[in-house]
Amino acid sequence: MSAPRTPLGRLGRVVHWAFTLAVLAFLVAPILAIVPLSFSAGSFLHYPLPGLSLQWYREFFGSPFWIDSVVNSLIIGAGATALATTLGTLAAFGLWLARLPGRGVVVAVLIAPMVVPSVVAAVGLLFAYAPVGLANSHAGMILAHTALAAPFVVVTVSATLSGFDRTLLRAAAACGAGPATAFRRVVLPLIAPGVAAGALFAFAISLDEVVVALFLAGPGQRTLPRQMFAGLNDNLSLAIAAAATILIALSILLMASVGWLRGRAARLAARTGQP
Amino acid sequence: MAEGSAAAGLAHRVRRTGGRRRLAAALLVMPLFVFLLVGFVGPIAALLARGVQDTEVPRVLPRVTAALAEWDGRGLPDDAAFAALVEDLRAARAAGTLAQAATRLNYDINGFRTLMFATARRLPVPGEDARAALIAADPAWGERATWAAIRRAAGPVTDFYLLAALDLKRDTDGAIVAAPAEQAIFLDVLARTFGISALVTLLCLAAGYPVAALLASLEPRRAAVLFAFVLLPFWTSLLVRTAAWVVLLQREGVVNAALLGLGLVEAPLQMIFTRFAVVLAMAHILLPFMILPLYAVMRAIPPGLGRAAASLGAPPWLAFLRVTWPLSLPGVAAGSLMVFIQALGYYITPALLGGASDQMISWFIAFYASRTVNWGMAAALSALLLVATAALYAVYARLAGETQARMA
């Protein structure tokens, strides 16, 4: 973009700015509009608010349906995060360590859950998990969310490892450390922020996931998004706005932490990576 | 000599370390690879396989399946086939499995379910002529088309569901013909899915391109502030953003209240459960996926190029057309593919914001899997969606480079 010198150019620049700000406003408007509604003292879905109140949050935290869904989300999220982070970190380290034969196929399988449309994944998982008793169970939901979240751990940890200095491994070997010791004592501490970012990413994926939950979860495994989906379909109350606000806050918290940890990982790698 | 053998030994050791390292790498990748193979890729492959299998008729009606294998398809089958059908119907009715085969045959010929159950209630007594008794029970058994339908469903492999997903079927002679109008809904669904996705992609490009261009022209610190407006929705879950639109677009929602308050409309507009709501919300949700790759590409265009074009006398529009636009094309391609691929598989947003005629292919996959439990149809439609997605993703990965594709 060259600096505008003519009046026409200046006008173009003003229009360009106005358009950009309008689009940016459009991007955040729905989110910013729903948050204040959750604090409404009335039950209307529009502004102006009749007054401020926490009644919808009281309804949220007072309802066994909503509370159970939060507990289910936390159980499934924690299980999926633990599994996905462990498996994903090991796999990312393996991919970084050496160029495997058939790498293309391996990578294709590892990133498949990122590419497969959510309904295809959900129906496929239901089709295969139901006959072996994994439908309508916490175990089934944890395994499904592990599969969906693990690729994000692999990608996040791989990005961290790409800045990792390989000579450190040789140095560790020269000091007599076996591969396992070297991983535990040298690699893991240095990529820890990347692993933590991957774990938060995995938790965020599980926390937001709704399509697989629609198919695979029974009444006993209803997660928060699943409960929200049900509420949106039958009785639309502002308790949904409260649930949405809680999820927005959680997402922002999680993703801001991911951003911070990634930055930290990059700085750590930069510090150790250069001689 | 000694030097040579030392070198050879070293090479051997290096090779061995390399080998050991590869082994360690393989062992590390193995757990996740096997888990995803068994727990994710396998299930989807099994589902897709279900789309080309016929299991109900050979399982429930084994005798007539075997008898029809010998039938030449011209004229009616022989008496043995009629007798086999009588035996099968008797056994299936007793075992309570008749409905499975009847449902499958009813997919092919409407009314087959009734035919099967009505016939099963009026089976000839042993010793009676099976052919005459069946035709007396229902003249449909005297028609070649009825028997051809059973043979088409006799498995083990079938193209029935894949053809049905393209509004095609096989006629009595096995030729591929257009499906009857009441079953021919899927080309319309496919066209709608691609149409909505294309429209959403165009809207995202039209809205996202100027934004990315402006952000790329700012100094990074100022761009970062505006970037928060792109990243906030990007981080917020899809369901929450869809829920926000559901609340906003109600008849008594924020948007209608504002339009009425401003005097722009006299009566509330019907916005929820319309195509407009689906496209608006999808464009809103997918817009960050357009802006981010566009920004990354435009940021890398040296600003000096624009100045050079201007100093050579090019007016801004010409400089844009000849310099900025061609250089930004990789971003346009990456962003458009990313948006289009994701839009193709959308389910939640159309399901909550659209009407019956706004549902995309994913809704039909869900419908067949959960409401009518027609796995074959769900699998065939899944295969269509997956092939389209995977093909476009392969193009995307080639364009954006493997690493960038994995980062997205």
Image (cartoon, coloured by chain):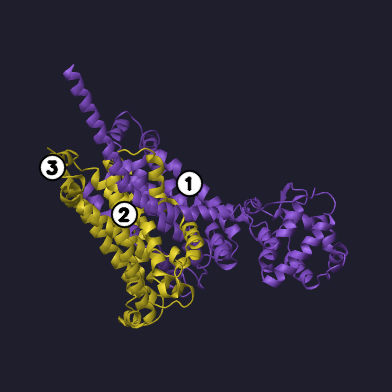
Chain colours: A yellow, B purple
Q: Residue furthest top?
A: B1
Foreground pick, B361 / A120 = A120
Secondary element at image label 3: loop
Disc 2: which chain?
Answer: A
From the viewer's perspective, is residue B169 above or below residue B324?
below
x, y percent for residue A198: 28, 55
Residue B137 lies in quadrant = bottom right
Q: Residue under circle 2?
A: A87
Q: Is B297 on the left-hand or right-hand side of A162?
A: right
Secondary element at image label 2: helix
Q: Badges 1 and 3: C-beta atoms under 8 Å apart?
A: no
Q: Is B215 on the left-hand or right-hand side of A229?
A: left
Would you say residue B111 is visible in this rendering? no
Q: Amino acid at mark 3?
A: Gly
Foreground pick, B83 / B43 = B83
Disc 1: which chain?
Answer: B
Residues behind callouts 1 and 3 on a single chain: no
Foreground pick, B107 / B199 = B107
Quick one: quadrant of the N terminus of chain B?
A: top left
x, y percent for residue B139: 85, 64
Q: Residues within 10 Å of mark 1 (few under 14, many from 20)?
A: some
